[in-house]
Image (cartoon, rainbow, N blue to C red):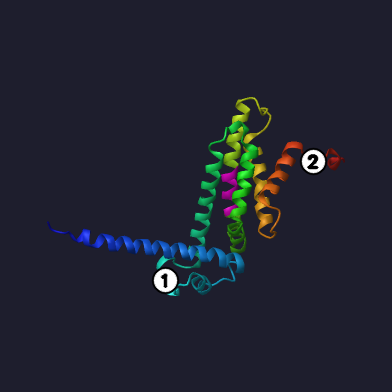
């Protein structure tokens, strides 16, 4: 039986692809730490490759420049966020999932607070915030709409607007974490839920 060139090259190509994938992941992980610590403007490609323990030339085999690496880092961070939130929220009964969704959103954003900080220092904050808020608001709007369909929430509530306002509060919490180590996500979620559930004291709005 003859052996084809594809059979000979297959295992070697697979090893090469796996090695390339590991190096790329190592560069992204190193970039995440370096950019969080130094900020996007101050960090250099040399800082990132040194942290990844690879040569500068290796960097350019995977990314065109620092901007391309940033784009990949933010896109993959947003996708990780989407997957983590979806895994927690998807099994929940929509009409009663808002508190659980808020807790899941806060926990996921806290786990990825370095991405928020990187976006902020890179000048990409407006775009990533807008897309992140759209992601959060999407989950919340589904929950509010389902609650309205079951009569749990009145029709006077504007579901898209309410979802946008709530997600805005959560995004502000993520921004807080970019500069403060506390509070933990459970406490942040409790504060948001408390405000939504009971509101602020009427005395604060006396004119």
Front-most of residues 1 and 173:
1
> On screen, 55 above or below 183?
below
Residue occupied by mark 2? 200
Q: Residues within 10 Å of mark 2 (few under 14, many from 20)?
A: few
> Residue 138 falls in which quadrant of the image?
top right
Question: Residue shown at 53%/55% (left/top)?
Answer: 77
**Of callouts 2 and 1, the N-terminal one:** 1
**Residue 58 got which mark?**
1
Q: Is residue 39 magenta?
A: no
> On screen, 183 above or below 136?
below
> Residue 165 falls in which quadrant of the image?
top right
Q: Residues within 10 Å of mark 1 (few under 14, many from 20)?
A: some
Question: Residue shown at 53%/36% (left/top)?
Answer: 91
Q: Which residues are magenta?
A: 128-136
* Residue 9 located left or right of residue 41: left
Label 2, label 1: how far apart the Cα atoms are: 55 Å
């Amino acid at each position: 039986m003859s052996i084809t060139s594809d059979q000979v090259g297959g295992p070697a190509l697979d090893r090469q692809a796996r090695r390339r994938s590991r190096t790329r992941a190592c560069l992204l992980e190193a970039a995440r730490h370096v950019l969080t610590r130094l900020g996007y403007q101050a960090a250099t490609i040399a800082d990132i490759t040194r942290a990844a323990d690879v040569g500068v030339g290796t960097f350019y085999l995977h990314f065109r420049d620092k901007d391309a690496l940033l784009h990949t880092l933010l896109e993959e961070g947003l996708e990780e966020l989407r997957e983590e939130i979806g895994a927690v929220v998807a099994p929940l009964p929509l009409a009663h999932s808002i508190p659980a969704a808020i807790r899941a959103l806060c926990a996921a954003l806290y786990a990825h607070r370095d991405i928020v900080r990187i976006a902020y220092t890179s000048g990409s904050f407006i775009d990533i915030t807008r897309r992140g808020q759209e992601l959060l608001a999407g989950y919340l709007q589904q929950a509010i709409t389902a609650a309205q369909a079951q009569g749990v929430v009145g029709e006077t509530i504007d579901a898209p607007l309410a979802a946008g306002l709530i997600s805005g509060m959560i995004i502000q919490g993520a921004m807080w974490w970019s500069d403060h180590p506390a509070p933990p996500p459970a406490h942040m979620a409790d504060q948001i839920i408390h405000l939504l559930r009971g509101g602020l004291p009427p005395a604060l709005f006396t004119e």
